[in-house]
Image (cartoon, rainbow, N blue to C red):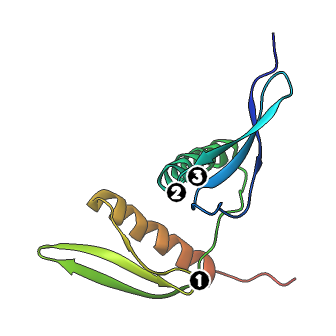
Amino acid sequence: MAPPNRVTSILPEPNQEGDNVIGITLGDGSTFDALINPAAAQVLVEILQRRLILLAHESAENLSFPEYEIIDANVLHQGPAAQLTLTTSQIGAVALRMSDDVLQKAQREIGRVVTYRSGPRTRQ
């Protein structure tokens, strides 16, 4: 059985047209570059992040996630709908669109984080 084709490199910067460039090595050892447009790259990242989060949860190991410094939180009103917004120092403001169930779960998880942070401190 021939070895599988694999993604073997990713250029850190987009090309002149704004596409992401990845290197692919075929089972026979030959290589070529493939272009991923920004929209497809965003979908790929979303899929991989979900899979990595599930993998971390299933294996009970910690992964390193991107971190954003949140400097403000607000509510965005659009008619009768409301969304939570966060302002970050890195990327500006983002609206978090989620169902009521997920929003309630987020509220519980934020409560847990606050509890962990305000709990007893151990001396190092």
Up the image or down, 61 lies above or below 78; here it is above
Q: Residue at x 55, y 52 (%)?
A: 41
Measured as percent of width and height from the top left, residue 36 is found at 58, 48
Instruction: State which tag comes first along the sequence, 1 or 2.
Output: 2
Instruction: State which tag comes first along the sequence, 3 or 2.
Output: 2
Measured as percent of width and height from the top left, residue 48 is found at 59, 47
Kindly check if marks 1 and 2 are in contact, taking CB atoms under 8 A apart as contact.
no
In the visual, does 124 lie left or right of 102? Answer: right
Q: Quadrant of residue 7?
A: top right
Q: Residue at x 53, y 46 (%)?
A: 47
Q: Quadrant of residue 1?
A: top right
Measured as percent of width and height from the top left, residue 123 is found at 84, 84
Residue identified by numbered label 1: 69
Question: Given the image, on which type of amino acid does mark 2 rest?
Answer: Pro
The CA distance from mark 1 to mark 2 is 24 Å
Residue identified by numbered label 2: 38
Disc 1 or disc 2, which is closer to the eye?
2
Q: Secondary structure at mark 3?
A: helix
Q: Quadrant of residue 26?
A: top right
The CA distance from mark 3 to mark 2 is 16 Å
Question: Given the image, on which type of amino acid does mark 3 rest?
Answer: Gln
Disc 3 or disc 2, which is closer to the eye?
2
**Residue 49 circle label:** 3
Question: Given the image, on which type of amino acid does mark 1 rest?
Answer: Glu
